[in-house]
């Protein structure tokens, strides 16, 4: 299940982040597991980068505003976002799946259920650099306007095709969902979307909508782990 969330960032946030990224020092991307590392040819903002803290705060604040993200991903934990740059010889990330468990500072692990890419360069700024994701319905190609985001299951095969002109800046992140299984999340997302539509048509106080909302909540209760 791919979900596109448009305009996660405000124009001001995007401009501020772009100016911080313009002054950053980049390093060869290293965060992936051994198999993905072979496919990974991009640049990444190092963990000790002075810009990283502010950039992460901006992204996390933006994510917290998104009711669509909440509904689609039901996030439980989000790993601090990272930033990457594709240009020149470091311009691609071949087919891979994201590694399953990521260590957290407290010694526990985050299970990657949902991956997200927030586009920070506009499609007119570069050629190539498409995110291609294998979905249930085949290979999907995603290239969004700056400030918009795609979320997809971490277990799906995906790649970033070579950037052949300009540079592509992005932010990527991993989430552990309250609901582990993609199909369960998809069912809840579909139900929540239908409920939102019904509320708009019939109002918040319709007795059957209240009953269905209770059913939605009981399914979350049944399927969630935290
Ligand atoms: Ni990946």
Image (tube, rainbow, N blue to C red):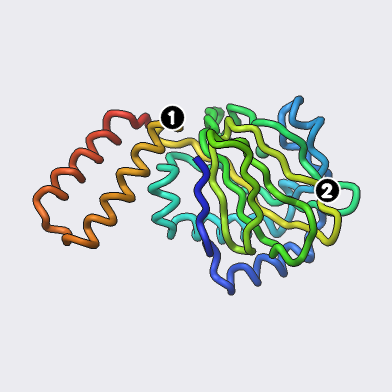
**Side (left or right) of 71 relative to 53:** left
Residue 205 x/y as whole percent? 12, 58
- Looking at the image, is 63 positioned above or below residue 37? below
Residue, x 54% and y 70% (percent of image)?
Answer: 10
Residue, x 65% and y 31% (percent of image)?
Answer: 97
Tell which quarter ligand 1 is in: top right
C-alpha span from label 2 to label 1: 32 Å
Query: Is disc 2 placed on a helix, strand or loop?
Result: loop
Residue 213 x/y as whole percent? 20, 45
On residue 91, which mark appears? 2
Mark nearer the N terminus (2 vs 1): 2
Mark 1 highlights which residue?
A: 180
- Looking at the image, is 37 positioned above or below residue 206? above
Check disc 2: other Cα within 10 Å, few if <14, some if 14-19, many if 20+: many
On residue 103, which mark appears? none
Q: Quadrant of the C terminus?
A: top left
Q: Are marks 2 and 1 in contact (CB under 8 Å)?
A: no
Residue, x 66% and y 65% (percent of image)?
Answer: 17
- Looking at the image, is 153 positioned above or below residue 56? above
Residue 81 x/y as whole percent? 61, 48
| Front-most of residues 84 and 105 | 84
Residue 167 x/y as whole percent? 80, 59
Query: Is disc 1 placed on a helix, strand or loop?
Result: loop
| Front-most of residues 39 and 208 | 208
Residue, x 42% and y 45% (percent of image)?
Answer: 72
């Amino acid at each position: 299940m791919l979900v596109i969330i448009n305009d996660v960032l405000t124009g001001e946030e995007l401009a501020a982040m772009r100016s911080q990224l313009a002054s950053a020092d980049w390093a060869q991307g290293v965060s992936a597991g051994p198999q993905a590392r072979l496919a990974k040819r991009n640049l990444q903002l190092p963990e000790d980068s002075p810009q990283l803290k502010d950039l992460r705060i901006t992204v996390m604040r933006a994510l917290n505003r998104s009711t669509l993200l909440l509904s689609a991903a039901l996030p439980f934990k989000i790993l601090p976002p990272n930033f990457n740059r594709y240009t020149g010889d470091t311009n691609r990330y071949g087919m891979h799946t994201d590694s399953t468990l990521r260590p957290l500072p407290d010694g526990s692990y985050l299970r990657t259920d949902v991956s997200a890419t927030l586009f920070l360069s506009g499609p007119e700024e570069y050629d190539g650099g498409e995110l291609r994701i294998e979905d249930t319905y085949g290979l999907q190609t995603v290239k969004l306007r700056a400030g918009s985001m795609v979320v997809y299951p971490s277990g799906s095969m995906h790649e970033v095709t070579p950037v052949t002109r300009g540079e592509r800046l992005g932010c990527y992140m991993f989430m552990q969902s309250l609901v582990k299984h993609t199909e369960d999340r998809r069912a809840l997302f579909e139900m929540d979307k239908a409920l939102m539509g019904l509320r708009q048509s019939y109002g918040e106080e319709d007795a059957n909508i209240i009953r269905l909302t209770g059913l939605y909540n009981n399914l979350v209760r049944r399927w969630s782990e935290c």
